[in-house]
Image: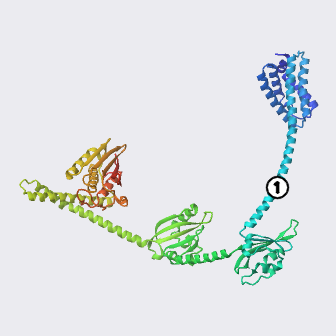
Amino acid sequence: MGALADLLALRREDILQRFEREVLARFPLQGQPRSVIRDTLPQLLDELYELLSNPSSAEASSALSGRMRQTARRHRAQRQALGYDVTQIVREYGAVRDCILGLLEETGGVLVLAEQRALHRGLDLAMGDAVADSEHGRDEERRKAEEERAAMWERERAARAEAERQRALLEGIIAQSGDAIVVADAQGVLRIFNPEAERQHGVGLKELPPAQWVEAYGLSDEEGHPLPLERVPLYRALLGEHVRDELLWLHRPDGTRLPVSVTARPLLQPDGTPGGAVFSARDIALRRALAQEREEALALVDTLLATIPVGLCCVDKDLRYVRINPALAAINGITEEQTLGRTLWEVVPHVAPTVEPHYRRVLETGEPELNVERAHPTPSRGGEPGYYLESYAPVKDREGRPLMVATSVVDITDLKRFEEQLRQTAEFRERFLGIVSHDLRNPLSIITLSATLLLRQETLPERALRLAQRISLNAEQMARMIGDLLDLTRGRLGGGIPITPAPCDLGSLGRRVVSELEVAHPARELRLEAHGDLQGQWDQDRLAQLLGNLLRNAVDYSPEGTPITLALQAEGARVRIEVHNQGEPIPGEVLPGLFEPFRRGEARGSSATSGLGLGLYIVQQIAAAHGGAAEARSTREEGTVFTVRLPRVSSRRE
């Protein structure tokens, strides 16, 4: 390391102090703090020291040159902000050189030629970069000036093009306008006459003075008399008057007359002097026809409102009545005239607290609330409670915002009373069936016991034995029918069929039920398929009843010679029971009501069914009592499949 590098390392503060004195003496930095005066000089000295320490590394020298350029740019930007020009910046770098070499000379250091070259190269790099940036700045300013001039010409060209486009657009708007547009110059000669004006008048542009307008264009009043010139809207606009929405009739060459709504106003030059007048006319023939149709429609609506037996009304956002028909006014006990303009609380204070929330929700959400059933006393029933079905619907503007709420009120009091009568009748019938079924069990049990005792008699004649067997079989069938009726009564009136869950093996139960049915139907093929763990907590007797009903149903409604399959499948926390039979599919319209009581189809099995049509209903009730569900599907390809899914543990108890 040479003397110059040592000087930069050991006498760095002395160099900075000398630089401060030189700058304050020669440059306009009086009153600036030390940090501003020194600026990037400490960093520059560090970079010069690094340059002197590694003069032979080309890669390091390239990186260092880049950093020195960055330092020089920051220094130049700071000095230019203080008012320096490029010459002062170059002189400041010369002052740095003088401070370093002067201090080296005073300390007696020997300057090596390589160090001298490196020092000059570093400072020249900084000064050259400052000069280049300055030249670049001037070039940039010239370039920006040229760009600004080009932009100005472009803006002027664009302005001319925009003016031309606006003129063409204005001409297009005038030509395509749905209103007739006519323009006269300051002398009253017509200059613009758009296509709609030609259609309305039935003639084209004629450059005529005002005195000939009335005759040429058929201007008349509502009675058909020619319009005096002083009443012609365009002529009045030429005289400085503003005319707005005035009715004018045009008598066209084909003999038809057209009503138009006219607006006319004067045109002024930029200096305020008169420049002519513009006239616009809108064809209101359609509007008049629509207005007449609207009046007829409103008359029809009023007639419907007056005659319809349903109560109807509209209320605004303040819940004030805007419309009400006689039916609702009669329900409320207040006339239509006394209702309109008043609020819910003023008209029906006894129901306002319960209906107001519905109105508020419809106004807030814009969604209707339909079929709200309500019971309350009304004047129309002498203060007695009545039942009403109410619906609330929003009346929206074109943007879809609710403006009002339309309400319909249907008096369903008589219907509710009729429904209650039907319900009481049905309940009485079902209770009667339950009572009769229960009372029949005792005499039936005596018949069954007697038939059983007769069958055990070894000396009984053959004819008597056959009669005893027939009595026993029919008694058993009657017992099953009575049991079904009792289950129907429990299901309808007793909250469902009661069960007593206990540990049960569904596989063993299925084998027992299939064996019993094989004895009763020896000609039919019954199959059992059991898969997986079939243990669970179920009411064994009720499940046997469920399986028996499904299998008997399959026997009754499947062709002879076809198999019937009972499939039992474990499914994790549930089990699946399926009974499959072949034959004609169940019609699609019958499937939804298959599990309803007293539904019987046409038997196609080995023997006609003598049940009451309660078997599948009881299956569904037993499944529901265990927390499960029953369903059916039937197609020609697959056959008919009844499926019951049960949880392994039922929480319901008897």
Residue 460 locus on image (x, y percent): 7, 56
* Res 315 → quadrant: bottom right
* Depicted 21 relative to depicted 191: above or below: above
Q: How is the image coloured?
A: rainbow
Identified at 72% across, 76% down, the residue is 260
Q: Residue furthest right?
A: 26
Badge 1: residue crowd in 10 Å (few <14, some 14–19, many ≥20): few
Residue 334 appears anywhere in the view: no
Of the residues shown, which amino acid type is indicated by label 1? Ala
Total marks in image: 1
Is residue 449 depicted above or below 72 in this figure?
A: below
Residue on which disc 1 sits: 159
- Give the image quarter of residue 16: top right
Q: Position of 72 compared to 609: left or right?
A: right
Q: In this picture, is 472 found above or below 320?
A: above
Residue 108 position within the rendered picture, expressed as x and y whole percent measured from the top left? 90, 15
Q: Does 16 sit left or right of 522 as displayed?
A: right
Image quadrant in which the N terminus is located: top right
**Residue in the image at 91% along x and 18% along y:** 105
Question: Residue 437, position in %: x, y?
Answer: 24, 62
Apparent side of residue 289 relative to residue 133 in the rendered image (left or right) = left
Q: Which residue corresponds to the image point at 81% horizontal and 25% vertical from the top-left?
A: 47
In terms of secondary structure, where does tag 1 sit? helix
Q: Is residue 301 visible?
A: yes
* Horizontal and vertical percent position of residue 294: 61, 75
601 left or right of 10?
left
Residue plotted at (34% across, 68% down) = 424
